[in-house]
Amino acid sequence: EVQLVESGGGLVQPGGSLRLSCAASGFTFSSYAMSWVRQAPGKGLEWVSAISGSGGSTYYADSVKGRFTISRDNSKNTLYLQMNSLRAEDTAVYYCAKGRFGEIDAFDIWGQGTMVTVSS
Amino acid sequence: VIWMTQSPSLLSASTGDRVTISCRMSQGISSYLAWYQQKPGKAPELLIYAASTLQSGVPSRFSGSGSGTDFTLTISCLQSEDFATYYCQQYYSFPLTFGPGTKVDIK
């Protein structure tokens, strides 16, 4: 079964750091681009960051550029999001999502999400 | 950045109705558009990609059309399980962007 399972969310103070993980199974992880998408409470979806299958190309939303770093370990079938200098507006459910085929594509598989709360 | 609008933001409908949701881009994106359904507390699910291609396993009452800047999602005969929020998303260029969503609720 194709599956994505996020972990690492929690409560963090403004200015703090957190690292999210997304464990993939059921498909050849290294062959697919992956993204992080977030959803603030009661709000819509916001794309955060993407990484190519090899990890050689990364992309970021302006709202997180310079603060968040996406990476992947293809030997462990795991995607990461390192989040630094966290702000209240980063509070959201963070989903990892698999691209269908190309480096930029629709998302055909989503994880269940992990909640990040930035508050003092 | 490609901006997206969706209309309506809220759609009240009854089971059996035909409903249409529109998505408009600030610039042309060819057919690089996807539609997702999201139910409360759940992750989004892909319904349609490439503007009109039905994702595997999605019921045929869902259809998509359009290209360039104007796109439409149609549900031909609304079922109880279709009451949800629907998002369009462009994947023509980074940053990827989503529409603000259309909530379909029970009239």
Image (spheres, rainbow, N blue to C red):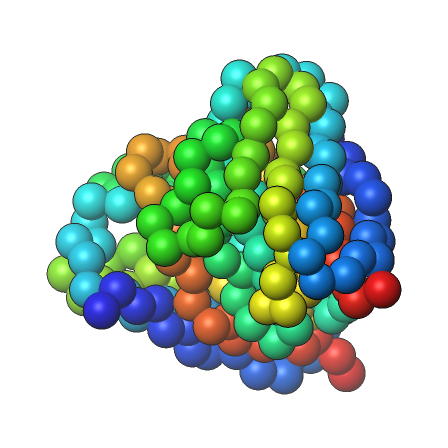
x and y, in percent, of residue B28 in the image = 63, 16
* Image quarter hosting the N terminus of chain B: top right
Is residue A59 in view?
no
The residue at 62%/62% (across/down) is: B79
The residue at 38%/62% (across/down) is: A80
x and y, in percent, of residue A14 in the image = 72, 72
Decide if residue A100 is on the left or right side of residue B63: left
Decide if residue B16 is on the left or right side of residue A103: right
Is residue A102 in view?
yes
Front residue of this view, candidates A68 and A51 = A51
x and y, in percent, of residue A59 in the image = 47, 39
Looking at this view, name the residue that lies furthest to the front. Answer: B16
B12 up-or-down from B23: above or below: below
x and y, in percent, of residue B73 in the image = 63, 39
Front residue of this view, candidates B71 and B81 = B81
* Image quarter hosting the C terminus of chain B: bottom right
The residue at 49%/58% (across/down) is: B45
